[in-house]
Image (cartoon, grey):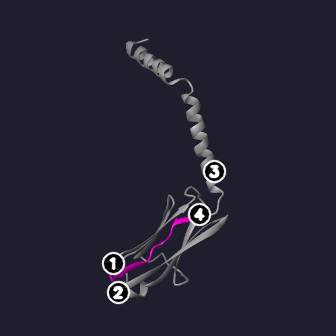
Amino acid sequence: MTSMKKLIFSICVLSFMLTGFNQEERFVEQSNTEIFGRISAVGQKPKIEQKLMNLELNEGGIAVFLARFTPIDDPNLKAEWYHNEKTLPISDDRIKSYLKEGYATLVINKVKPADAGIYRVKICNAFGEDVSEAKLTVTK
C-alpha cells in the first residue's frame, strides 16, 4: 500500500472511531424518511398554501400572479388558469404560465385594459383540486 492510500485508510478508520459506526444507519434512516415522505405527498389532494394576490397596474406593466401549493413532487399535477371565468389562452406571446417545484405562476406582459378582471388558478390532480382568485386592475 502506498503512503497516500495508508493515510486515507487511517483517516477513514479514525473517522469511524470518532463518529461511531451507526452513521451509516442514520443516513439510511434519513434517506428512507425522505423517500417515504415524497411517496405519501404524491397521493394527496393539492392545497394552495399561498393564494393569488390582487394587483393594480398601469397600462403596459407586467402582471405576475403566483400561487404556492403542496404537494410539490406530484408529476400529475396541473395548473389551469382562467380570466373572468373563461379558460385563459396561454398561447399568446404576452401571456406565459409556469408550473414548477410547488409554484404556479402566470406572467402577463404589457397589460392592457382588456386584461383587467378576475384571474383564477385551479391546481388539480387525481385526488382533487384547490383554487385561488385575484383581481387585476389596469389604469391608463
Crowd around label 4: few <14 · some 14–19 · many ≥20 (10 Å): many
Please report whichever mark, 1 or 2, sits nearer to the chain's N-terminal start: 1
What residue range appears in magenta? 46-60
User: Which residue type does callout 2 highlight?
Assistant: Thr
Side of 44 relative to 134 (left or right): right
Is 68 situated above or below 120? above
- Residue 77 tag number: 4
- Residue 61 tag number: 1
Please report whichever mark, 4 or 2, sits nearer to the chain's N-terminal start: 4
Q: Residue at x 43, y 81 (%)?
A: 136
Closer to the observer: label 4 or label 3? 3
User: In which quadrant of the rendered view does residue 32 lie?
Assistant: top right
Closer to the observer: label 3 or label 2? 2
As measured in the structure, the alpha-carbon distance from the residue carrying label 3 to the one carrying label 2 is 46 Å
As measured in the structure, the alpha-carbon distance from the residue carrying label 3 to the one carrying label 1 is 41 Å
Please report whichever mark, 3 or 2, sits nearer to the chain's N-terminal start: 3
The reply to whether dot 4 and dot 3 touch (C-beta < 8 Å) is: no
Quarter of the image that includes the C terminus: bottom left
Q: Residue at x 60, y 64 (%)?
A: 46
As measured in the structure, the alpha-carbon distance from the residue carrying label 4 to the one carrying label 3 is 14 Å
